[in-house]
Amino acid sequence: MKIFYSPTHTKHHPPFEILDGGERSHSYEVPERVENILPLLKQQTWAEILEPVQFSLAPILAVHDEGYLEFLKTAFDLWTAGENNDEHVALIPATFPPGGMRRIPRSVLGKAGYYMMDLSAPIGAETYQAALQSANCALSGAAALVSGERSSFALCRPPGHHAGKTNCGGYCYLNNSSIAAHWLSRHSKVAILDIDYHAGNGTQEIFYERDDVLTISIHADPAEEYPYFAGYSDEVGKDRGEGTHLNIPLPFGTRDVSYVEALQQALAKVESFDPGFLVVSAGMDIYQDDPLGKFKITRAGIHQIGSEIAELQLPTLVVMEGGYDLESIAENFIALIENFNTPL
Ligand code: SP5
Ligand code: ZN
């Protein structure tokens, strides 16, 4: 299995995030999340670890707004204006537009409020470079499928599924899975299955009005959990896209058996859509020991999830999203992806 990894991700190391109640916490989204997976992957005889191909910006701009991309690229330098001091660790806004207000201010702080959905996606000096390489990992995984591979794995960091056309948030800047899925959609219909603990609001938005990319997300009920404003079961797509989005919200405490029931419902929908490719937005924050997740999925459950998805017998790109328990993240990802390791 071709696995795409770029060391550039280590340049993105958010120094803090603001949690519920305004608590300034260490970031859960740390370089160790990927660095801990690499050694175990290298021990697998089937794993071939490669640096990503350098794509142009075109496949990213096909998904994200040009003004947003320009903001990501320039925000840190504009904010610091060349002065590197302790106050300029990473940019987050203090002002957000109230519902419906969509002016784009000239000020970089104003723009930060416009382009960020929360306080969990600070922009540091090399965040943009890391996000680009993360997207290149996903695109390289997509290209491997077009070349005839049965599966590929993109070790994406920063993650992507909370990033929308014009927003970062929830540790995400560029929507890696969506960029790869759109790129694949030139060849055939594509399905994205999002199994991260959190609803994939960015992916939902990007494809909401399209009927050539099916998007499904299984996640903690957004009525009670981040990202709160998307991921509800009555959100089914719009216009041409009506019927090609499916949200399956599940309660806190969900265990293997009921998770797999929900997964089977999702897989039936994928089968009837009959895509040429499958992209899995994979977050191991569904695991029972995850510090941000409230599901109770076991290692055996994760293996079963992988095995059920693999039974679709579709060319499959697995894209890393969340997962914050540094002790278990490597074994969990291997339990998931080893199912995709045998030819179709
Ligand atoms: C990619 C991804 O998984 N992003 C998730 C972002 C979640 N951010 C909200 C975190 C709220 C945490 N509240 C519980 C604190 C535990 N001590
Ligand atoms: Zn998540």
Image (cartoon, helix red, strand yellow):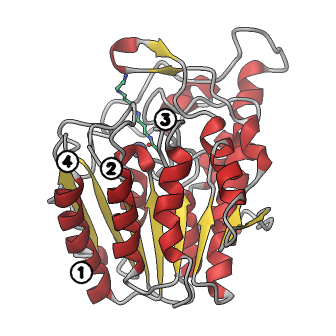
On-image quarter of the N terminus: bottom right
| Residues at discs 2 and 4 in contact (Cβ within 8 Å) | no
Spatial CA distance of label 4 from label 1 is 20 Å
N-term mark: 1 or 2: 1
The amino acid type, in three-letter code, at marker 3 is Tyr
Looking at the rendered structure, the number of numbered marks drawn on it comes to 4
Q: Is mark 2 within 8 Å of ligand 2?
A: no
- Circle 4: is it few (<14), some (14-19), or many (20+) Cα within 10 Å? some
Q: Nearer the viewer, mark 3 or mark 1?
A: 1
The amino acid type, in three-letter code, at marker 4 is Thr
Horizontal side of residue 333 vs 234, given as left or right: right
| Percent x, y of residue 330 | 56, 49
Spatial CA distance of label 1 from label 2 is 23 Å
| Residues at discs 3 and 2 in contact (Cβ within 8 Å) | no
Residue with the mark numbered 2: 298
Residue with the mark numbered 3: 114
- Circle 1: is it few (<14), some (14-19), or many (20+) Cα within 10 Å? few
Whether residue 102 appears in this view of the structure is yes
N-term mark: 3 or 1: 3
Question: Which of the labelled discs sits on residue 268, or is there none?
Answer: 1
